[in-house]
Image (cartoon, rainbow, N blue to C red):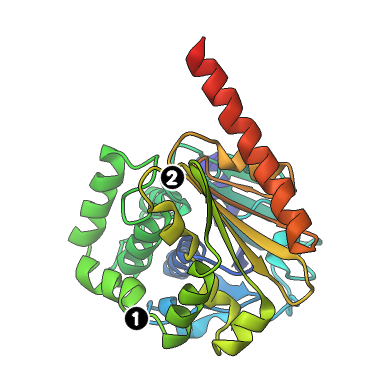
Amino acid sequence: MLNQVLECVAARERFLLTSHARPDGDAVGSALACGQILRSLGKQADVVLSDGVPYIYRPLPYADQVVQTGLVNGHYEAAIVLECDSLARTRLEGLEPNFIINIDHHYSGKLFGHVNWIDPHACATAEMIYRLGREAGVKITKEIATCLYTAVMTDTGSFRFAGTSDRTFALAGELVRCGADPVQCAQNVYFANPTSKMRLLGAALSTLHREGSVVWMHITRAQIDDCGAFDEDAEGLVNYAISIAGVQVAVFFREMPDRRYRVSLRSKGAVNVAAVAENFGGGGHVNASGCSLDGPLSVARERVLAQVRLRLAQRSEASAE
């Protein structure tokens, strides 16, 4: 499939690159790096994100060139959709008429493009973009390496999540050799949180509930407003819950402006949370996934927890046999 992607790139000149709404580190870093790789090949490449670049990723090279809009403006010969399971999840209107190149590494990746390159064995979409650049003969500059390293670092949970392997560390080492500064990348992401995010973390932890090996917490729109926070400040808060000793699954519910709930799920391996999320139209990694549900919170919470409990029970029964 990589060869098909390269052929499509060689045959076209103008590209739009995008990823899912509420972009994370892999979405942003992969899009920025891919855009620069295409420009190095003499192509025109515009990175367009419906929600723009989150605060902690704005120091990345080329981040200031990202266009934030909900509508495709201009004529493109192809759109490259990165780390995303559907066009709808980009929240970018006007993508449908374009030739779509779909690049993703998620277990739950969907074949919605004209060309689909999905590799669940890649530690991050950034690993695939690195391979794309190398196969295209593009020099991996310090700037490209910084974007890719940040993407790999965040999508592997700082090399803690399942799927991290010797290949992952080999890739990270190569990106450092190409100029990425691992200390600076980590400081930009993990030591540059706004005060509002810390206040929101406190509000979320105050709602923490535990049931055996499962924990859950939530935040409301009122709490977000009271903390002076933004929706992006809620990203990653679920990781504090999964860090508790003895916990196997953590679930975080965030009330969105439309009163639906964004659900983030994390697992230490006992439950495939991507399968849980797929029940509600979401997806992701085996140990990190997400979905959205209608409220009220009590209903959304019980629907998700029922699926988690079911899978824990099935695992327990299988272990007893």
Q: Quadrant of the N terminus?
A: top right
Residue type at mark 2?
A: Val
**Left or right: where 107 falls relative to 147:** right
Secondary structure at badge 1 equals loop
For the point 40% across and 61% down, the residue is 151
- Give the farthest residue toward the top: 321
Q: Judge from the rendering whether residue 87 lies leftward or rightward of residue 237; answer left or right.
A: right
Give the secondary structure at mark 2: loop
Q: Position of residue 37 (x, y in %)?
A: 43, 64
Residue 128 x/y as whole percent = 44, 49
Badge 1: few (under 14), some or many (20 or more) residues near its Cα, within 10 Å?
Answer: few
Seen in the image, is 271 located left or right of residue 74? left
> Which residue is tagged 1?
192
Can residue 86 be seen by looking at this rendering?
no
**Residue 67 rendering spot, x and y as whole percentages:** 60, 82
* Relative depth, front residue between 305 and 16: 305
The residue positioned 34% from the left and 42% from the top of the image is 164
The residue identified by callout 2 is: 247
Q: Earlier in the sequence, mark 2 or mark 1?
A: 1
